[in-house]
Amino acid sequence: MGEQQFDLVVIGGGPAGVRAAERVARSGRSVMLIEQHAVGGTCLNYGCMPAKSMIACGILYRDAHEAAFLGIDTDTIEYRQQMAVKHKDLVLKRMRSGMRDQLEKAGVTLIEGTAHITAPHRVEVDGKTVRGENILMCTGTVQGDLTIPTARARIPVIAANAAFDLPKLPARVAIVGAGYIGLEIASWLNMVGTEVTVVSEHSEILGFAGADIGRRMRLALSTVEFLCGFDVSEVDGNELVLKQKDQEGTPKRIETDMVIQVVSRTPRLSAVALKGLEYTDRGVVVDAKMRSNIPSLYAAGDVTGLLNLAHAAYRMADVAVNTMYGDGTDRFESTMVPWIVYTTPQLAGCGLHEEAARAEGFTVESSLFTLSANSRYAHAHFDPKGWCRLVYEVASGRIRGCFLMGEGVSEIIGQASVAISAGMTLRDLARTAVPHPTVSEALSDAADTAELRRVKSVTGHGFHPHL
């Protein structure tokens, strides 16, 4: 290969790396993308996409059973795990192939190999040298080891990402970890007939979303058992042994056929072989323009430790590219990035929940709007539970956060993201015309309801300026 020169050298072919490489190449600049394993990164190959494929199969299975309430015969329905895994693998293969074709058409030079950054403009790939005007690190994270003691175990103990390749599903499973990964696996397995117990070391699930939302999510996942505030001691035979935090007494033992542990992930920094790069145990330290402390070296995606979400990685890649080759004004703001938990029902959010908003000095209130009041939603679901919560500043009505729980709310959280990013008020959102009947009406209706409440609290009377 010799010593080749490129405008941009990207290390890592996950969401951030692919996005940046394609955008820069389409602008006419020379780009090399170095990927150690398979394009698509953790999201496509091991995490997000496999999970969503299996969840989609579970939803179809559940919906087929619940279709009886619409007058559809559901007597002969069977879930076949091996067929679901085969479908998942076929879709992932097709997506990887499409991603490689997309990069090739853009003019990206894609090579497989292990990269090491040896100087501000130099990368070694399997002993050969590549030079880049700029280097973008998109190396992601690596999964840690299982930490549950298993010396006396007689049942499988596996990491979360291995769950999506199981040839046969257990009748009972205990999931250690109550973040979005653990809950998505719990929801999927529960939908297809597995008895699920979720164990959390914290006092509530989904701590990043706020305690009240975590509680509401537990109530929504009513067929899943939750044990909060427990440490895991070991797996003994076919039992998961737990100890309640800060309490003495007899350990709690759960009989199960399998334990799935959601293990932590750490930034993949093995590509860095130069001295002086600033990083922490969370990842490479970057500013809001994705610049590291070394000129010409940028980072984007999970390796930064800012947000481990594929769409956040896309946004970081956009900011990095705009900093390198644009006007330099673009900035990454993590609070403007929406997140989704693909349980059934789904949970989605963007912006600040009430506790976080008050911690930042805002005087806020929130308003809860039930989705069962939405005509499209009520007709489409057997059990139309769900809600929309808007967090807003009391004085101005500016929307600071939006949180949704319900079937398919992942498809409308983007509207809330636009509203929050644009600095819209409740009145602005309430005055936005949306098609009827659609679930998206719930956002404007929630804003209308919240604005009426806000005006009454501020003025003391019922005059509503939206009417």
Image (cartoon, rainbow, N blue to C red):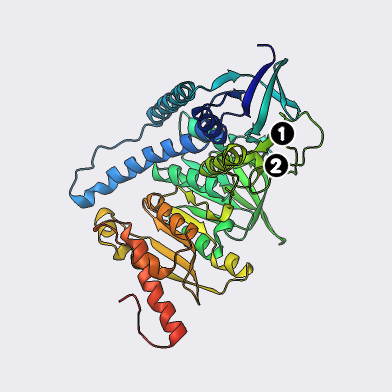
Image coords of residue 425 (percent x, y): 44, 68
**SS for tag 1?**
loop
Residue 269 horizontal side relative to residue 394, left or right? right
Q: Is residue 99 above or below residue 432?
A: above
For the residue labelled by badge 2, is the local secondary structure a helix, a strand or a loop? loop
- Mark 1 or 2 closer to N-term? 1
Image quarter of the N terminus = top right
Residue with the most extreme top position: 1
Badge 1 density bin: few <14, some 14–19, many ≥20, Cα 10 Å:
some
Q: Amino acid at mark 2?
A: Gly
Q: On the image, numbered disc 2 is attached to which residue?
A: 283
Q: Residue at x 65, y 51 (%)?
A: 242
The furthest residue to the front: 327
- Classify the position of the C terminus by image quarter: bottom left
Asked if 445 appears above or below 269 in the picture, the reply is below
**Residue 364 at x, y percent in the picture:** 53, 73
Q: Of the residues shown, which amino acid type is indicated by label 1?
A: Leu
Q: Position of residue 300 (x, y in %)?
A: 62, 39
Evaluate if marks 1 and 2 touch, with contact meaning CB atoms under 8 Å apart: yes
User: Residue 269 got which mark?
Assistant: 1
**Residue at 33% from the left image edge and 75% from the top image edge:** 466
Residue at left offset 42%, top offset 52%:
414
Whether residue 131 sits left or right of residue 441 in the image: it is right
Of residue 325 and residue 17, the one placed in the foreground of this image is 325
* Image coords of residue 450 (percent x, y): 40, 72
Q: Image quadrant of residue 278?
A: top right
Q: Residues within 10 Å of mark 2 (few under 14, many from 20)?
A: many
